Amino acid sequence: MAALKDRIDDDLRAEGLASDANTMVDKADHDAEKADIDAENTDYEAEKTDVERDSSSGNAVAVLPEDTLSPDDYPKGLQFFFILIALILSIFMVALDLTIVATAIPKITDQFHSVSEIGWYGSSFFLTVASFTSPWGKLFKYFTLKWTYLLAVFIFELGSLICALAPNSTALIVGRAIAGLGAAGVASGAFILVAFLAPPEKRPAYLGIIGASYGISAVIGPLLGGVFTERLSWRWCFYINLPIGGVAAVILVVFFKLPDHVKPAEATFREKMLQLDPIGIVLILGAVICYVLALQWGGSTLPWNSSEVIGLFVGFALLLIAFGFNEWWLGERAMLPPRLLKNRYIHQGMAYSFTIAGTYFLVLYYLPIYFQVIDNVTPIQSGVRNLPLILAITISTIVSGIGLTVTRRPMPFMVVAGVLTTIGVGLLFTLDIGTGSSKWIGYQVLAGLGLGLGFQVPVSAAQATLPQIDIPSGSAMIIFVQTIGGAFLVSAGQSAFVAKLSEYITTSDAAISPQKVIGTGATDIRRVFTAEEVPIILRAYVKGIQTAFIVAIALAGACTIIAFAAVWKKLEAAEGEGSAPSPEKSVEAKSDV
């Protein structure tokens, strides 16, 4: 503009009109600034449309049907009843898979002779659930809802069948990973289907009914796992999914029909690929696999300072950095939209969920090992002994939900949950050979109350404060770290468990091979080893389990610290930091670069 002004001045000075030139230039400056503002507003509107279009992911409805469905379009009578039953069965099946396996793990190690791979049985499932929850949300948006959901059920069933028929530990791990891939779609898709089952005012009740199946499966899972493992075979923990999923699938094929005018969203192939974030999936899968392998091999199969273990840790770090860059580049299309990470309820909720979920899964996986190996009880008795933990979690989850609704202050629940969990897990650490029932019952109740009070608070807080457009993505981000926390921290606990077990046996006076102990099934110890060797091995198991619980204690302590740093104020349903973009603060959509 300065050059334009000089040129106009030179042209008009001869005529004595320099002052007019100033006026003209000022007007030109004003018009240019106005054009810039108009352009920014135009860009914002386009970006806002992108945000509204792309923000759907996770366990929320991708495209709400209120604007497209009339009251006559919703199913009624027997059609409604059967569809609801199918969704309940689907969620029950997936939720059951989370708790039924833990009781069976000691017997699984007996058959496959691989205590060192216990961590993989959980991590492989959690890893694919976390990595594919967001992509499934996008698939439901861009492809036919009914058949996409049935595909998820089929994949879960296929994974369960592979687990049930697994000839070795590797096949079981692969089956668990495939089942997790399907479970991610079943869990997220069920909540989307509810939107087409009932109008908005009735949905909360049906969501509550479907959600209750989580609690029911959590209670009966350990018991059912114990019954199958003891009376039939641990393989029935996976066979059971086949008839449940089969019935649900048949019902949906027959009864679920979308109105003709409801169509998947249209997009180019490139846009669909960007939405699914395949690069992000590959990067996070690779990162976690490197991490788990490093922990599994380090200190047992290979020295910690070996080139292989160091290389795996370096690969983990590089892939994690690449994943972060990919998410930044994709912007609103990413699994973890960078804009939302600026919201305190999101980033603090993610950190809190990561630690409390890791604590929960460590306790869930190692208590059955304690009961079946140290106390030498049957799988059924082990499942019964797990009930204090599960019932306490179920009850306190309900209490925290009601309390948060009434008070709208998440911070007190998060702090109390962290403190109770830390104390409860700290007491579980003291479990030893011959510990009385009053102690392991009381310790589980205390830990369960803490875990239940805090587990769902971050998701509830995010949903209560985010703008409607951001709720699906915000919820999915927190659920992502909950499940990825299971993959990370069960592996960390397993590494600590095996390392301590091996160290104790190595430093003992008995001529026992640590590799033989690790290669022996957890409940086969008394059959394989002599009467003189068994007490030493049991003591080694106690030390290993206690070390895994040390990891859980550290996580619970970190959870408490994070809770004290959480937002203290009362929840308000308004736009806040990191919420939907405004004209003054445009969204970064780097995926268009």
Image (cartoon, helix red, strand yellow):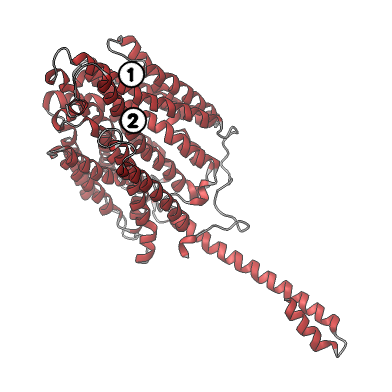
Residue picked out by circle 1: 388
Residue 493 - label: 2
Q: Amino acid at mark 2?
A: Gly
Number of marks: 2
Dot 1 crowding, Cα within 10 Å, few <14, some 14–19, many 20+:
many
Q: Position of residue 127 (x, y in %)?
A: 32, 42
Q: Quadrant of the N terminus?
A: bottom right
Q: Position of residue 203 (x, y in %)?
A: 40, 41
Image height check: is 279 above or below 384?
A: below
Q: Are marks 2 and 1 in contact (CB under 8 Å)?
A: no
Q: Position of residue 51 (x, y in %)?
A: 49, 57
Q: Residue at x 21, y 47 (%)?
A: 154
Q: Position of residue 497 (x, y in %)?
A: 30, 27
- Closer to the camera in the image, 378 or 509: 509
Image height check: is 52 above or below 458?
A: below
- Secondary structure of residue under mark 2: helix
- Closer to the camera in the image, 286 or 402: 286
Outermost residue on the right side: it is: 16
Residue 169 - label: none
Question: Taking the image as drawn, is residue 541 in sight?
Answer: no
Q: Residue at x 30, y 53 (%)?
A: 145
Dot 2 crowding, Cα within 10 Å, few <14, some 14–19, many 20+:
many
Compared across the picture, whether 412 is left or right of 250 comes to right
Q: Amino acid at mark 1?
A: Pro
Question: Taking the image as drawn, is residue 364 in sight?
Answer: yes
Image height check: is 74 above or below 44?
A: above
Specify the quadrant of the image occupied by residue 162.
Answer: top left
Specify the quadrant of the image occupied by residue 358.
Answer: top left
